[in-house]
Image (cartoon, helix red, strand yellow):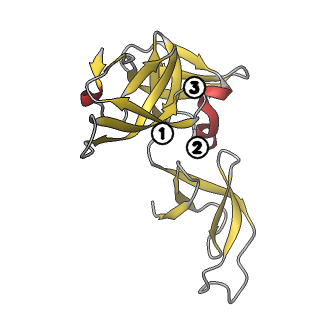
Amino acid sequence: MATTNDLKNGMVLNLEGQLWSVVEFQHVKPGKGPAFVRTKLKGVTNGKVVAKTFNAGLKIETANVDRRDMQYLYNDGTGFVFMDTADYEQITITDDIVGDAANFLLEGQEAIVAMHDGLPLYIDLPTSVVMEITQTDPGLQGDRSSAGTKPATIETGYQIQVPLFLETGTKVKVDTRSGDYLGRVND
């Protein structure tokens, strides 16, 4: 148990049997009336974002969320298999929990898996990953200086927009939150 005065971004609350992550909070002390805390909460399991207001000093139940460093091993057809890097225990995480992170998961890649009571909740990838372009149309002569983009398929099969001058086989840095091209990587 904690009070609303203890709220921090990223803290996970257990409200009415559901887990909510604190995205944003603001302590408000109006000139008239009691103080309160205005929050923006994101549902851990469904991703739904809601605004909720609490009275200052109100006791709220926090959830114990264990964030573990894990390594992605492979997809076995029923889900994604991860290995805990501390004790080498393997778990299978379903497609719906992995979600869009699957677009940027390569075998052997590190990720943080959030667990609650032994059940995986969500996966945190690094903010950017290095991927190789497996297929893209060649850039046309004269297009090399313009700011245009073209579609390119990366190693995982996900399609991103890249500058016209990039070719198949080029390694690029990709933002895992938005899927945006961040730059070319030289080996």
Quarter of the C terminus within the rendering: bottom left
Can residue 10 be seen in the rendering of this structure? yes
Q: Amino acid at mark 3?
A: Thr
Q: Picture coordinates of residue 8 (x, y %)?
A: 30, 34
> Could you tell me the amino acid type at mark 1?
Leu
Of pointers 3 and 2, the one earlier in the residue sequence: 3
Distance between mark 3 and mark 2 Cα atoms: 20 Å
Q: Which mark is residue 125?
A: 1
Q: Are marks 1 and 2 in contact (CB under 8 Å)?
A: yes
In this picture, is 16 found above or below 113? above
Farthest-out residue, front: 32
Residue 45: which disc? 3
Quadrant in the picture for residue 23 = top left
Q: How would you rate the neighbour count of disc 1 (Cα within 10 Å): few for under 14, some for 14-19, many for 20 or more?
A: some
- Is 184 rendered above or below residue 44? below
- Residue at 40 percent of width and 25 percent of height: 12
Q: Amino acid at mark 2?
A: Phe
Above or below: residue 2 compared with residue 25: above
In space, the residues marked 1 and 2 are separated at their CA atoms by 8 Å
Q: Residue shown at 52%/23% (left/top)?
A: 121
Left or right: where 121 falls relative to 66:
right
Is 161 positioned to the left or the right of 111 in the image? Answer: right
Q: Does residue 68 appear left or right of residue 93 in this picture?
A: left
Q: Which residue is mark 2?
A: 104
Q: Nearer the viewer, residue 25 or 151?
A: 25
Find residue 144 and report its horizontal and vertical position in percent: 62, 84
Instruction: Work out whether mark 1 precedes mark 3 in sequence or the reverse, and give the earlier one.
Output: 3
Q: Quadrant of residue 37?
A: top left
